[in-house]
Image: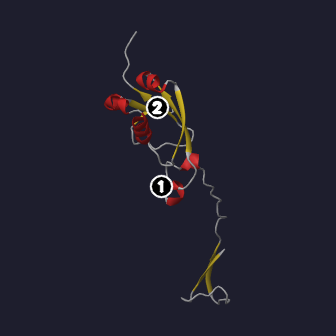
Amino acid sequence: MVVIWKEAKFNPRIPQKNPVSVIPLAKPQQHRYDPLKMSSQLPLTRKHLMSAPLQITIKLFAIYQETYGTEVLHWQVAPGSTVMDVFQRILSEHPSLAEWQAVTRFGVNLEFVSPETVLQEGDEVVLIPPVSGG
């Protein structure tokens, strides 16, 4: 309950006289931070930047698969990392792939996305270069 007093100065240790009204409040809800549901809605803070790294899966096709010699990579990235951050890491490990940068499309969890998309725990990132064949 909240009591509103007529007097301007209020000291919680001293009982006050003349309450104007008593307003019952609803029971406060317990909010629990769920990073999988809320992280895309919250701004990055120092607390987020210092939290544990995210586990992501990177699926490779065509030239990326040939260069790495595998179909899938499992990486840890910092919270707040974007698809472009992952791609820049790939380019730093294999500079010869830079020629494919302009024509590569990106996907996260089976949807095409922009390079600025922020990654979440457990995301599956896909690099899709142009392919041909029959």
**26 and 117: which one is in front?**
117
- How far from the left and from the top, in percent, is residue 45? 49, 58
* Pointer 1 or 2: first along the chain: 1
Which residue is tagged 1? 44
x then y, percent, for residue 68: 47, 27
Q: Is residue 40 above or below residue 30?
A: above
Secondary structure of the residue carrying tag 2 is: strand
Disc 2 marks a residue whose amino acid type is Glu
Q: Residues within 10 Å of mark 2 (few under 14, many from 20)?
A: few
Q: Residue 75 in the image: state x and y as whole percent.
A: 54, 38
Q: Is residue 6 left or right of residue 65?
A: right
Q: Secondary structure at mark 1?
A: loop
Q: Label 2, on which residue?
A: 111
Picture coordinates of residue 69 (x, y %)? 49, 24
Quadrant of the rendered structure where residue 105 is?
Answer: top left
Relative to 129, 16 lies left or right: right
Q: Say if 5 sits above or below 47 in the image.
A: below
Of 117 and 84, nearer the camera is 84
Instruction: Please state, as top left, top right, bottom left or bottom right, where the C terminus lies in the image.
Output: top left
Residue at x 64% of width, y 68% of height: 25
Type of amino acid at the residue the image marks with label 1: Leu
Residue at 63%, 55% in the rendered image: 32
Local packing at callout 1 (Cα closer than 10 Å; few below 14, some 14-19, many 20+) is few
Q: Quadrant of the N terminus?
A: bottom right
